[in-house]
Amino acid sequence: MNEMSAIDRLNDNEPAAPLQVTPRLQRLMAKVNPKSYPICIEKARLVIESYRAHAGLPQITRKALAIAHFLDNRTIFIEDDELIVGNIASKPCGLEVGPHGPTWPEEDFKSLLQSGYEISPEDEAELRALDSYWLGKGRTFYERMGRVYDDERIWPFIQSGIMLPPWAKKDEGRGHGITDFGWGLTLGYSLIVVDFEKVLRHGTKAIIAAAEAELRKLRFLEPGGLEKAEFLQAVIIAHQALIRIANRFAKLALDMAGREQDPARRAELEEIAAICAHVPEHPARTFREALQSFWFTWLMIASGTAAGGRFDQFMYPYYKADLEAGRINPAQAAELLAMLRLKVMHSNGVAGGKTQRDKWSGMAKWHNWIIGGVSRDGKDATNDLSYLILDAAKLCPTPHHTITLRVHDGTPQDLMIKALEVVKLGIGLPAFVSDQSYIDYFTGEGASLEDARDYAIGGCLDGQLPGKSRTNAMGMFVVPLVFLMTMNNGFDVRTQKQLGPKTGAFEDFATFEDFFAAFKTQLRHFMELAAEEHNILLQAQADFFADPIHSSLMEGAIEVGRDALSRAMPFENGAILNPVGMINVADSMAAVKKLVFEEKKVSKTALKQALAANWSGFEDLQKLFYDAPKYGNGEVYVDGIANALYTFWSDTARTFTSIYGGTMKVAGISITSYGPAGSLTGATPDGRFAGENLADGSMSAEQGRDLKGPTALIRSAMTIDQRGFQATLFNMKFHPTAMSSKDDLGKVAALIRTYFRHGGKHVQFNVVNRDMLLDAQKNPERHRNLIVRVAGYSAYFIQLNAKIQADIIGRTEQHFAGA
Amino acid sequence: MNRSPTSLVDAVGAGAAAPAARADRGVAGSIFNIQRYSIHDGPGIRTTVFFKKCRLRCLWCQNPESQQELPELFFNAEKCIGCGRCEKVCPEGAITLRDGRSWTDRARCTGAGACVEACPQGARSLMGRVASVDDIFQEVSEDAIFYQESGGGVTLSGGDPLAQPEFALAILKRCKEAGYHTTLDTCGFAAWHAVEMIMPYVDLVLYDFKHMDPDKHKQYTGFSNEPILRNAKGIHHELKVPMRARYAVIPGYNDGEENAAALADFIANELDRSVPVDLLPFHKYGGAKYQRLDRVDELAETSPPSEAALAALRDIFLSRGLTAKIGG
């Protein structure tokens, strides 16, 4: 592929791969990247059928009955070669429509069908008919929110696009049409990591038994007894349904075994039958059983953001016992883990609404498996499975599930190198996160050190304590829109409304400090509105997305006896305020400070004219602003402003209360919203044209503005105090030649460790060749397998929209030739 | 060839140098690049300071902009739109418009750089600047935390740092005081007293061997290899500075089996089998640089060596019990 890799072969730097891609894996892999994806409607049909039959019952009861109706009646199948069973959609690689609102509007649906999704005319008609359950009834989630949006304050804010995407109509929200990812009724807008060990170690029968015991104990002498009883009953109904569907798989496997001609496959099917008859009802006894039990459980909580938790930790006892008993060898374990990757690959979904899809480009999903890090007692937790999970990604280089490696001082260098060998494959994973920074965040918010050390990632990069914490309602707040409003005395040019307070005309600011203070006033104003929006969303979702299954897998569920969304978690992140384009504001501030206020090279009027004209006729001025100091080059002048902005954001967010008690918290994660956010944002004084993408992530530089190499970029990111952020996002893109030999990988590992030792929280890499990306744009057919790292997830490059593709190509490529 | 001023003092006097060259800021010298995250020039993460000036004139030089001590004009003809702004500002009247593009009379160009500022297209740039030891030390120190983590440090390369020995010495001293690992990349063509003076501050030498035949060496580089081989032995045996031998493999010039065998024998017998060898394949990245200097690329027709040829050459070193690898 490139000169250096050929040389590596000559130097024998690459050891012979100890693990082989088996023919079985090859066949399974061929199935997960089809030319088109079938749209499935079975779940919507069955769930709405149940909702209709049980109208008027308490919401949690209706949810439990809907889960049971769906699981009892849904299509199940076992594919050839599979060892872990449990199909997601009713067709392989299908997109199962979610029963959470009306389907895509006509126009939107057409565009979806044009981009590689298909549905039969009969199914399409039935899907449309199902809309009657929602349309005109006022019962959707968005409608409940929209009904309280007053025309004076909140509604203009929602329309402004500061919270992405702007709503067009109060009853349509972010757009209709959504797909599901698994067997459950989704986690709503929550990011959680459930306690998988509850099922693996004790079986769902223990959860049912605990709920039954709690019911027997319950006396109705205090408020809330009725709700508690209803919740406990719902838990029992849903978990019994889960056991029933596992038994359906057991029976199916046995039936198939009876018809199977090949004795080897017959034996496999019989083993599958035995495993599914045992788990998840009973405690898992082997690695295979633990994997199957995990998979059934994961399916029940699967949403776009369902995490795998500290997978190497809770699965290790099963692997170790099997290994010691001679029941498994590392190659078999790696193959099973690779098969699990492929099961996750069958979990496909897209968002409703085109803007929402652009925001989450490339069938975004955040199924994050965590490896490494420290144990609860602070020792290195790396084990054989940490390595095997990476081996599985090498065997099976699919974009999902993603992997995040927790790094601390004691992380073995071998693990770092193996992780970077996977990164080098160009699939954009694993991501690397700093134990120090994440643990500091949790202890800083009051968690015990032991709990903090046990964190995993839910969603993109959001730290969660398994079974104990939650992050909610992470909106995308477009900060540069507020910057431009500050320049216009609170007036929003796009919607032609006075949205912010009048903080003074730009021309009248005597000093940069005055201007900066005005910006803070504006920002605080809009952050408060965003906090209100978040709290409205949380209250609406508590009812709408009630779910007995995921609730029962959180700490204290049975004792408290409340749906998870109706109670605070032991560690509650409440709602998150999440800035997009903060780096554009830092760069703009630095340029304005230097050129307008300090050097007075440019008048305020001229700058405003230039921005209004989108720099047209002001090209010399644009060059001046473009060349002003930019974040990402290790320059204190601008990096200091970036830090001041993020600190203000973090401090201000903590002055707003969340409905779960405590304050709002912060993250810095933009997913791919820097594309659509850029489309809404006019020209900015960082030299950017109107409509151009904003800076990605939160710690990344603006595209192509970091010119001094990775160490300078990292030094800029180190300037920012990231401890108070529950997640930050930092993308680096490396040309393959910079990650060629094992020695090179050691140097990248040193980069990561240095960053983390000095306050860094997260970093991830794209290792691709620019020419390859350009060719993929021209000839997508040839590059169907080309994977890039987008934000918290990897995606097939050709599935990304053109704007995001251009951005990936434009992100400064770190290419270093030797002298 | 360029008829520029012949010394640094001339250059500073002529105003070509940046203000950094003020005498009170310590010894100054001429460099053309500072490369951060340099990962193929010694252990760990490094910053490489590329010195201007080299006494050798290797036909295959891949950094021709490094040969002269003073700043040299780089001209990218593809970017030139023939606007003539450079012509108006040149203090030497060295620029004229020809066929819709600017043309520089290299004999008259002093590297003053007025045209660089004036060019709206970025077609003109100056290769090289005068920098003080303080400036350089400050710049390389920005990445000190990365050296610490990776066991890296600072590499002086070029050009040849030994062509500006006092300057190199001053930088190396500062780096050693700060605890940075230091690497010197040199062709070893220097007076012994300069080598002796500098080596105590060097942790690793990357030593370039061009050719083992003294006559061929003279033919290809302008000088005999006699002092180079002598210095190599002195560095290894007397000064005992760890060394890596570097062999840039240039097809048609020094890639013969005989030459490789002579180099391998020299290292094995006259130095030590502990000295590892890096075979650096010729590449074509230098070609465009000759164009931008209005110079002829003597090796325009030469292609990089094949993988098979490199492997065969490497085996010659391995057969003498040496450690050898391809790539830096």
Image: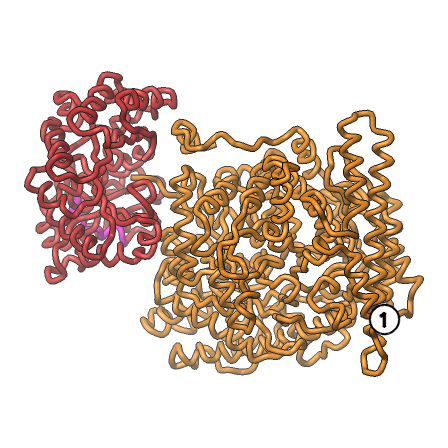
Chain colours: A orange, B red
- Residue under mark 1: which chain is it in? A
Q: What residue sits 41% from the left and 57% below the top? A: A755
Amino acid type, callout 1: Arg
Residue A560 place in picture, x, y as percent:
74, 73
Magenta region: B109-117
Residue ranking furthest to the top: B258
Residue B177 place in picture, x, y as percent:
18, 56
Instruction: Please rate how many residues cluster around mark 1, counting C-alpha atoms within 10 Å: few if below 14, some from 14 to 19, many from 20.
Output: few
Residue B65 place in picture, x, y as percent:
23, 40
Instruction: Tell me if residue A799 can be seen.
Output: yes
Q: Is residue B288 left or right of residue A37?
A: left
Q: What residue sits 34% from the left and 26% below the top? A: B304
Q: Is residue B315 above or below residue B200?
A: above
Q: What residue sits 62% from the left and 79% below the top? A: A657
Q: Quadrant of the C terminus of chain A?
A: top left
Q: Is residue A495 above or below residue B315?
A: below
Q: Is residue A614 left or right of residue B122?
A: right
Instruction: Tell me if residue A806 can be seen.
Output: no
Residue A355 place in picture, x, y as percent:
66, 58
The one nearer the camera, A226 or A721, is A226
Q: Is residue A795 above or below residue B228?
A: below
Kindly indicate the quadrant of the structure image that contains residue A269.
top right
Q: Is residue A220 above or below residue B80?
A: below
The residue where tag 1 is placed is: A216
Q: Is residue A697 left or right of residue A147?
A: left
Is B223 colored magenta in this rendering?
no
Q: Is residue B76 left or right of residue A722?
A: left
